Amino acid sequence: MNFSRRRSVLYVPASNTKAMAKTAALQCDAVIFDLEDAVAAEVRPAARQNLRDLFHASAQRADQERIIRINAVGGVPDAEDIAVAAVCKPDAVLVPKVEASKTLAAVRQALDAQAAREPIRLWAMIETPMGIVNLREICQRGSKPEIGLRCLVAGSNDIAKEAGLPLGSARATIEHWLAAIVIHAKAFRLDSLDGVFNDFRDEEGFEHECASGAKLGFDGKSLIHPNQIAPANATFSPSEDAIREARAVIEAFEDPVNAGAGVISVGGKMVERLHLEIARRVLAHV
Ligand code: COA
Ligand code: MG
């Protein structure tokens, strides 16, 4: 399946069957079922079984991606998590704490060994200083078809922890770390997702951080609570104004009067062919 929108991507601990069951009715573009940090080691076997049960029992929704976050301590993929992913065949496996492409290659190899290569894609969490430093190497090799990296996910809590910053005020300091993730994603034609906002009762704070993520150029935001879905969808969708403007640009270039023109005027603004491409991209995300 080809998903064009990743505005709202909700984490759910795979140990929480009640929350997992709820996700099918939620309007988030993707769900990340977590086997990593949100699940204590002693309940991981039960969480793996929960995933088997859920993927076996419920059909994929055409408008919602399903991702499994595995464990990969020291860059080595957890064999039992890989086995679950191979059975469940989610749209993607999210690999935590990626610091080099060899970790992604190891996950790909482990999935291939279980005959589960297609169509499971890889997503990578960038959440350590070394992950940021090695972004180019990770994206360059990871985005090759034989590895299949599709999306970078910022792990803002881990970045703050690694950088020794207080969680509440870390955002301003790590914004340029986040910008590095966006730039590399754009250079290698990957999607990128902003990190989570922990204080899920603080609506104003969340909207503010969503806006900051959209301004940085992220395609969407990773979320921890259903309350965060609607504001994320709104922030990462094109605005009414942007849609109106995109339609006007497309109409203007389709007008026979402008056939062959490279640059025209629309609503008092200079518009070039590159704006036509931008307009088409905007409408593709409506
Ligand atoms: N996905 C789906 N449903 C969720 C959910 C999630 N991430 N978080 C909460 N819900 C559901 C709850 O089950 C509850 O359902 P109910 O009304 O039928 O009882 C409802 O939404 C309201 O939940 P609320 O009481 O406000 O929160 P909570 O105390 O149950 O849960 C958290 C709070 C933070 C523990 C929970 O949101 C959570 O686990 N989030 C994901 C954490 C995670 O995966 N982190 C890893 C990546 S950072
Ligand atoms: Mg993390």
Image (tube, helix red, strand yellow):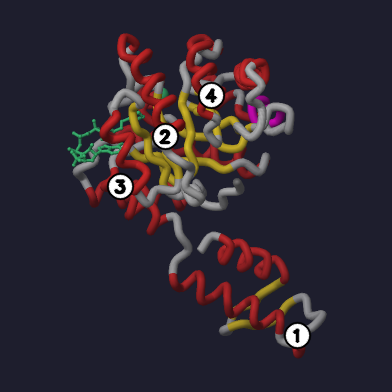
Q: Residue furthest bottom?
A: 257
- The vertical placement of 197 against 247, above or below, is above
- The vertical placement of 3 against 200, above or below, is below
Within 8 Å of ligand 1, the CB of disc 2? no
Camera-near label (2 vs 4) is 2
- Amino acid found under the numbered disc labelled 4: Val
Task: Work out whether mark 1 precedes mark 4 in sequence or the reverse, and give the earlier one.
Answer: 4
* Figure quarter occupied by ligand 2: top left
Q: Is residue 101 left or right of residue 37?
A: right
- The vertical placement of 253 against 213, above or below, is below
Task: Work out whether mark 4 precedes mark 3 in sequence or the reverse, and give the earlier one.
Answer: 4
Task: Work out whether mark 3 precedes mark 2 in sequence or the reverse, and give the earlier one.
Answer: 2
Nearer to me, 151 or 55: 55
Q: Does the residue at mark 3 contact the one at mark 2 (Cβ under 8 Å)?
A: no
Which residue shows up at 41% across the image and 19% down it? 48
Q: Does the residue at mark 2 contact the one at mark 4 (Cβ under 8 Å)?
A: no
Distance CA(mark 2)–CA(mark 1):
55 Å
Circle 4 is placed at which residue position?
87
Do we see residue 102 in this rendering? no
Element type at marker 1? helix
Quarter holding residue 237: bottom left
- Amino acid found under the numbered disc labelled 1: Asn
Camera-near label (4 vs 3) is 4
Circle 1 is placed at which residue position?
258
Camera-near label (1 vs 3) is 3
- Residue 167 in the image, given as x and y percentages of width and height: 29, 29
Q: Residue furthest left?
A: 201
Task: Work out whether mark 1 precedes mark 3 in sequence or the reverse, and give the earlier one.
Answer: 3
